[in-house]
Image (tube, rainbow, N blue to C red):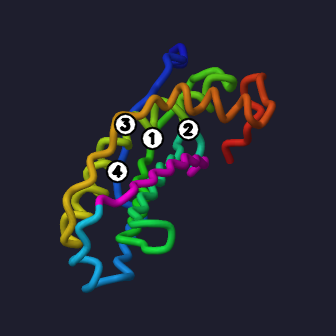
Amino acid sequence: MAENNQPVFSIEKLYVKDLSLEVPGAPQIFLERETPQINVQLRTSGQAVEDGVYEVTLTVTVNARIGEDRNLFLVEVAQAGIFQIRNIPEGDLEPVMMIGCPNILFPYAREAVSDAVTRAGFQPVLLSPVNFESLYQAQRQQTGQHAAGEIPVQ
């Protein structure tokens, strides 16, 4: 019987790996009427769990500030997934993990951020859609790595 070499990509599990929320100025901060400045940072990482199985984590950090020195809130969500990725050329593995997987994880991270901020007593933060392909390309150009597979995934 011939071995099946068809590419495989499947979601095994999606979960919140870490969630933290800080409201350092409570309760006085709730009396503020000024519109906060929202800063959003994204970070993606991946690692092999076993042969053909990978964990990818999308970490979203949202910081709301009033002025330069007063934090309204800080929320960080590490949304993770376990993915089965098999029979994909080695040069294509990294883009799948750094583009395809975060595209799947982002809506869950977005919901977790919005829910945490709402539960903290603030208006929900609705994160705009993200183009992970352009972020991946920009990161590769910034680090000077243009050939596929040069950014370690392990």
* Separation of residues labelled 4 and 2 (CA atoms): 24 Å
Left or right of 63 in this view: 135: right
Residue to which mark 4 is pinned: 109
Q: Which mark is residue 52?
A: 2
Taking the spot 39% from the left edge, 62% from the top edge, the residue there is 64
Q: Nearer the viewer, residue 6 or 149?
A: 149
Mark found first going from the N terminus, 4 or 3: 3
Residue to which mark 3 is pinned: 104
User: In the rendered structure, which amino acid carries the disc numbered 3?
Assistant: Ile
Residue to which mark 1 is pinned: 83
Left or right of 95 in this view: 120: left
Neighbor class of circle 4 (other Cα within 10 Å; few <14, some 14-19, many 20+) is many
Q: Are marks 4 and 3 in contact (CB under 8 Å)?
A: no
Taking the spot 26% from the left edge, 47% from the top edge, the residue there is 126
* Separation of residues labelled 3 and 2 (CA atoms): 18 Å
Q: Which mark is residue 34?
A: none
* Separation of residues labelled 4 and 1 (CA atoms): 16 Å
Q: Nearer the viewer, mark 2 or mark 1?
A: 1
* Separation of residues labelled 2 and 1 (CA atoms): 8 Å
User: In the rendered structure, which amino acid carries the disc numbered 4?
Assistant: Ala
- Write the start and end of the magenta stretch as one range: 35-49
Q: Main secondary structure of the magenta part?
A: strand
